[in-house]
Image (cartoon, rainbow, N blue to C red):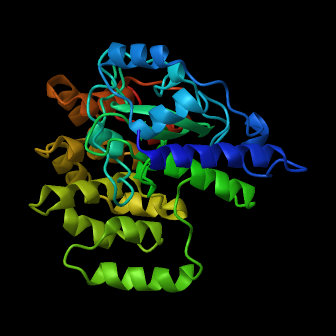
Amino acid sequence: MPDADRARLARIAAKLTAARALPALPAAFGVESHGCVLEPPVPEAAVTAFEERHEVTLPPAYRLFITELGAAGAGPGHEMPGLPQKCWDGGCRPGHLAEPSPYLPGPRYFGDWQQRYEDPPGPVRNFLRGTVSVAAHGCSLLTQLVVTGPARGRLFNVDFESEVGPYVVEDADFLAWYERWLDEAVAGHYVGWFGERSEPDDEVTIAEDAARYTTSRTAPDLVVLAVLGRLTLADVLPELAQEEVERRRRAAYALAWTPWGAKTEAIGSQVSEDVTRELLHDPDPLVRYHAVAAVRWYSQGKLNAVLRERQKTETDGWVRHVLDWSLDGPYSDPWIQRAFTGADDPPF
């Protein structure tokens, strides 16, 4: 292990000791849960056994931390979980960590990240493969450390129950991430959902500039327009007919998942069933997935028969999942009941 890493570890240890010695613990998110206290390090033999069992080698900065400073406890969020609880669901299945994680540094991943990169729900789902959890921020918010894959050693934040896609934080490794959290917590910064970028001060000016930019492009950025509240159906419909599959995917996503708010009913009345029907037969499975969601969202119950025919022949796991949920799901869900419009088939 490089001397520089051991120096960083010693610096972190001293800062934790200093934080505990303060008249009052830092009033940062999660600190009251762990009190800036780490559990004893993991024995080298236990870490080696974990690595051999999962056919991986933990990234060196993280491995140094848990074997020489602390196994769990103080860290971003409510606490840093221990090694046995490192997978997102509390237990690592064979092969889970050895498969490469697909997530790379760059912009936040798009809202349909699970349909693009993860297995559909099921008893043997391999979710967030190639990563271990290093922070629990509450609810479904996690920070994952990449163990296997091109971004090995980097960390990303993810909300696995929402459309907020993974975002690989800027820190180069675990020690850099951890020390930055500690510095910001002691300085009094809000460190909830730690690692995210700060919001710009002049949001209005930036919004205006972004809106002008994206509408001037040959392919308008529907995501930016939606975030800014400037998206219209006139922006979406032409994109659904594009030959480039990524443009169709983004347009279908915008059609199905944009929170139109009070305009939803009016927008729905403008979405032709012919448009949605064509999307249900698109050669791309992700477009079909969003098309099923659009049928449900815009209460196009007359397309139930088309969905049931699609259900008989569909081979893509994610499309089958949304079809099964839409057609045979829990009828007690008020959202599903609202989508039923009196077609002969059972309600959504």
Position of the C terminus, as image quadrant, is top left
Residue 210 in view (yes/no) = yes
Q: Quadrant of residue 189?
A: bottom right
Q: Position of residue 210 (x, y in %)?
A: 40, 80
Q: Is residue 322 above or below residue 154?
A: above
Q: Looking at the image, which residue sits at the far right? A: 23
340 or 214, nearer to the observer: 214
Position of the N terminus, as image quadrant, is top left
Q: Residue at x 21, y 65 (%)?
A: 239
Q: Position of residue 61 (x, y in %)?
A: 45, 40
Q: How many marks?
A: 0
Q: Looking at the image, which residue sits at the far front? A: 3
Is 343 left or right of 306, judged from the image as shown? Answer: right
Q: Residue at x 39, y 69 (%)?
A: 224
Q: Quadrant of residue 155?
A: top left
263 or 205, nearer to the observer: 205
Is 21 left or right of 127, judged from the image as shown? Answer: right
Q: Position of residue 129 (x, y in %)?
A: 34, 30
Is 322 left or right of 21, judged from the image as shown? Answer: left
Residue 191 in view (yes/no) = no
273 or 245, nearer to the observer: 245
Q: Residue at x 53, y 22 (%)?
A: 85
Q: Is residue 90 above or below residue 140?
A: above
Q: Position of residue 121 (x, y in %)?
A: 36, 25
311 or 286, nearer to the observer: 286
Q: Residue at x 53, y 35 (%)?
A: 65
